[in-house]
Image (cartoon, coloured by chain):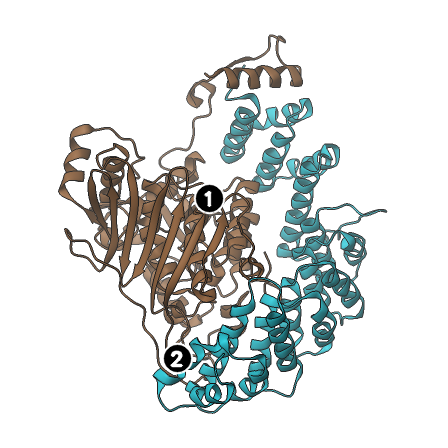
Amino acid sequence: MSTRAKNTRRKFLKQTGVAGAGVYLFDIVPSRVLGFQGPAPSDTVNFGHIGIGGRGRGFLRPEANLGKKVPSSTNLGGDGTRVLRASRSVALCDVDASRLDDAATRVGGKPKLYKDFRRLLEDKDVDAVYIATPDHWHALQTIMACEAGKDVYVEKPACNTIEEGRAMVTATERYGRVVQVGSQGRSQQAAWQAANYIRGGRLGTMRKVTCWHYASPDGDWTPDTDPPSGLDYDMWVGPARWIPYNQKHTHGAFRWLVDFGGGQIRDRGAHVMSIANWIMDADHTGPVSIDAKGEPPRDGMYDAAVTMEITYEFKNPDWTLVWSQPGTPSKTMEARYGAVYHGDNGELTVTYGDGQPTDTEQKAKDYAAQCNCGKAFRSPGHSENFEDCIRTREKPIMHMEAAHRVATLCVLGNVGFQLQRKMEWDPVTERVKDDDEANRMLSRPGRGPWHL
Amino acid sequence: MADDKQFLADLQNASVDVRFAAWRAAGSVTPAVIPQLGKLASSPNPGVAKAAREALTTMTHGVGKTASTNRTGVEKGLLGLASGDYALPVRFHAFRLLSGIASEESVPAIARWLQNTDLREEAIYCLERIPGPAVDKTLITAYKEAKDDFKPRVLAALGHRRVEDAAGLCAEAMRSTNKDIAVAGVKAFGRIGKKPAGAVTPPEERGLSTWQRIDEIDSLLRFADAQAKQGNAAEAMRIYKTALDRPEEHWQCAAIIGIAKLKSEESAAAILPKMKSSNRTVRITAEKAWKGMAGEATPRS
């Protein structure tokens, strides 16, 4: 134990008047010795699901699968066939009624069905929630879930603004909740192998990480219509700025509007750059400058960047992160997106970084196998890690602060792209230096009753 | 400086590429084109409407970094769009752009739309983003003049901006018989984090919906956190202890976490019993809080 820790402890004991009382002995003791046994592995977690569209369906836990092996294609982060932790989907919620019955059938049993997520959060039978709604809802629903005492797995990106991300961190800490954000690449074996290889110094001093990704669609013109019956469109828009209903900007396609999805950088960037931040040990900091270039859609209804190149400069240690769509793909591995890590002594590629076949080069796999160094935490799978943490109350691998820092990269990339100017960023105060408009864009007042 | 007339013609060109080149270069045209852009932004040709909207956006971002004469010109032009006889979506767009660059001088002109049912949400969004005390004062006045269905929205803006001068108004709102206003009052109060002169009576739990009750307790916890940060440990402890005595696990946890930050003898006395809680999450939270206070020490009985 360090001198500092001892001093702190001594000071604390003095302050509390407990020292010397002879009643307590202070030491670091395993919790089991104290009778704090921790959760029994057989405990079953009751999940509520908010948002059960394309992504949300992947989180459902059919009754029939309880205790059975499931393939990694369930897209939950992790490798190979495994037995998921004991858990049940006991409540389902979606603003689109047409999805509820289908999801209930998939789950089996008799899950409770809700259209308003607040009713699900009030449900005392629900221990934790999976949130797979469109991005503009992630922050508020996560915060409200914490306020209601639920642990949370929320899809990436964590948030749409800097203010949202910081508010999510605060809510998580205020209530002592477990919040895992769905950048599941960190739970992939290849990412772990790459992390060990790079952190083990095999590339020497790290200088640069270059991410590549294909460009975004530029969209077309589809007329606005009335929303379909069964869809509570006002609830779908929620805290975002109001726009008329259009089938090409709701389910799935919201991605290409900056106010809602934020384009590829906020979608896949939250995967690829999550691994970069993890490997580069930047989970609690951020860049000092952001320089954005690129082109928006020339026509059509979308506004998220079609092409972009964002250069982030980090200090202490000094390194550069580049997000490019399209960028220069890896010379050693074939993939639609990923990142190349450049050090003084060489390079290493990590492909994808989400539920896709994330992979890395053989040299990193061999190193991880030989050194058995375990410098990086080895997640058992993203959902498993979340569910383990529900029981142990430890921070998950993609904890809220880390997710906020990754989302910060995505958000600042978009702000810089929209403003078309270089920004100087203070990662401590989380403000842009000498840029009034940019700072106003770091938050978004809520709409109607929806506020942070 | 580009020729304004040619610029407007290019925005309406049949070629997507010509329109695109025009709106990407809109930072170099004068604010005099803004009224015309407002008309084009509601063109039945969606490509032209987009080009006009994007041109307005580009012009705004071009002057947004710092205060300048150019910025004032664009600001006035946008204010004209927001306030003028333009299509509603165009006015929405103008308010949203103004939110990024408007100065305190524009506040009265924006605030008058808080009385307009179609525009009040956009107007308050815009005001909420404008820094400075002029907006704070305007919102306090607006609260008093707002219809009941809009009072919660004004309170939310005051809370978001942490307007300390509104703490008394929040306390007053909490006493409203309208539960939505009362809960909005306590929410704003918690976010502002300042205790006003006089008594503060949060809405009674009876009559609140389950979610309103969650909002209320969350807001009081936020207020306690603010008090702790401001050095008012006694007030913070009083609120935390109320939460600590509740049966709900997460409110106990929040109280434990808050109390631990106070690092006092009273903190230790409050947390210690929770380390024997029958609730595992409470127990673990208390153990962690204790460790945090004591520098990794754990009590052994």
The residue positioned 38% from the left and 37% from the top of the image is: A317
Chain letter of the brown region: A
Query: Badge 2 sits on which subunit?
Result: B
The residue positioned 49% from the left and 33% from the top of the image is: B280
Residue A294 shows up from this direction:
yes
Chain letter of the cyan region: B
Which residue bears the numbered disc 2? B21
Look at the numbered disc 1 and give the secondary structure of its residue: helix
Please provide percent x and percent y for residue B111.
72, 72
Looking at the image, residue B238 lies above or below residue B84: above
Name the quadrant containing residue B268.
Answer: top right
Name the quadrant containing residue A219.
Answer: bottom left
Please provide percent x and percent y for residue A380.
29, 40
Name the residue at the front extreme: B1
Closer to the camera in the image, B44 or A192? B44
Circle 2 Cα neighbour tier, 10 Å, few/some/many (<14 / 14–19 / ≥20): some
Which residue bears the numbered disc 1? A401
Please provide percent x and percent y for residue B62.
51, 69
Identity of the amino acid at label 2? Ala
